[in-house]
Amino acid sequence: MSTAGTKRRLRTATAIAIAGAAAGGSLIAASAFASADEPANASDLIIGSDSPDAIEGSYIVVLDDAAPKGLNALADDLGVDVDVEDTLGLVDGYVAEMTESEALELAADDAVAYVEQDQWAHIAEVQPDPPSWGLDRVDQDALPLDASYEYTQSGTGVDAFILDTGLNTEHQEFTGRVGEGYDFIDDDADPADCHGHGTHVAGTVGGTTYGLAKDVTVRAVRVLDCQGSGSYSAIIGGIDWVAANADGPAVANMSLGGSFSQALNDAISAAVESGVTFAIAAGNEGQDACNVSPGSEPTAITVGATDEDDAAASFSNFGECVDILAPGVGITSAWIDGVDAENTISGTSMATPHVAGVAALYLEANPEATPDEVATALTEGAVADAVSGVNGSPNLLLNTAFLAG
């Protein structure tokens, strides 16, 4: 979570800056108003219409705060045929199927804050196979590693929501600590993991062996499928669910991302306002994190990755939208092939759960802390100027020593 002025908040106004993330797309400027002398183009009025991850025919419609009626009534007034698939409470929005021309007509109405093309998000990882070292690194100020992880808290009483590919609930890393979750891919209460990424992330947050916060309650929210992809609308539904079901100190980990999305960022902002601390992957495209979502959302803690030599990972997104750096290369954690399965993978996806785990440790000792207070504690407790090649990111390396008081 950046302090004022350290992150760009990309907002719908007279111009909206969006960018392709997974494909490293170029910056696109989209005017919020089409010229009266020219026909409206999708890129003029619809956020994300030019995204390489756009989902054809699916749109997120967010109404203005002063809108007197819902989307169905508004569509009827305009003579627009829309098929409402879901509501998104945190952003006062709707997921709807319609044609591009119908979306353009809605986007031009004063009762609509913005229309955004639904998009695909993807997990963020690369795959070398070195030994794991992240736990060892975060409890000491400097290298060399001392072959130990020392901790004074374990995350007792804290819920850790993992918005990802699901969870291997039978894994011995989570025995007795799996809380209620939900599956927004299959629309049921069984968020089983058929990919592995979510289980790996959860293991780093709160696994008995691999985790930083070894006594958190792990709550899986499956928003990505067996291939590691999911729509922004499903992810926003998952964020809604987290905000509605968080009761007490809670952290949420989002090791996923894609092209810029105002709706996704707004949903996270609202969930943070409700009291949930969000740790978010900066992304793995080696570009400015301000170009992607959810890494560009300033109310969350955006995390870049480092390697075992305290260098910024070559793949890690960077810049002023990054808040903190953490180990993300060659991280070993739980996997889906059995009750004791493990895997070693890399990415900002692996760095982010280190931060979520430390946030959970802080919340055990400070259960009334706000997300802003959690973020401030983690950034002020980080080791400064330890990382090489940060490329405009804050040179702050995650550290747990401050938790010892």
Image (spheres, rainbow, N blue to C red):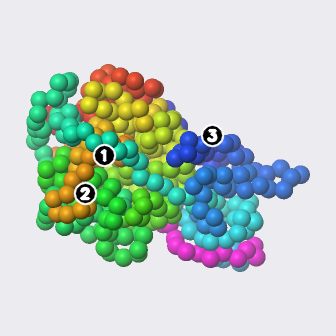
Q: Amino acid at mark 3?
A: Ser
Residue depth check, mark 3 versus mark 1: number of the one nearer the observer: 1
Q: Residues within 10 Å of mark 1 (few under 14, many from 20)?
A: many
- Is residue 89 covered in magenta? yes
Q: How far separated are the C-alphas under marks 2 and 3?
A: 35 Å
Locate residue 42 relative to residue 183 in the image: left or right: right
Mark 3 lies on residue: 26
Q: Relative to 327, say whether 180 is above or below.
A: below
- Please report whichever mark, 3 or 1, sits nearer to the chain's N-terminal start: 3
Q: Amino acid at mark 2?
A: Trp
- Residue 200 % position (x, y): 27, 53
Q: Which segment did they paint magenta?
A: 77-90
Residue 15 visible in this rendered orientation of the protein: no
Q: Tell me the SS state at disc 2.
A: loop
Q: Tell me the SS state at disc 3.
A: loop
Q: Tell me the SS state at disc 1.
A: strand
Mark 1 lies on residue: 345
- Residue 89 % position (x, y): 48, 66
Q: Which quarter shows the N terminus?
A: top left
Using the image as rendered, state which of residue 29 and residue 376 is in the foreground.
Answer: 29
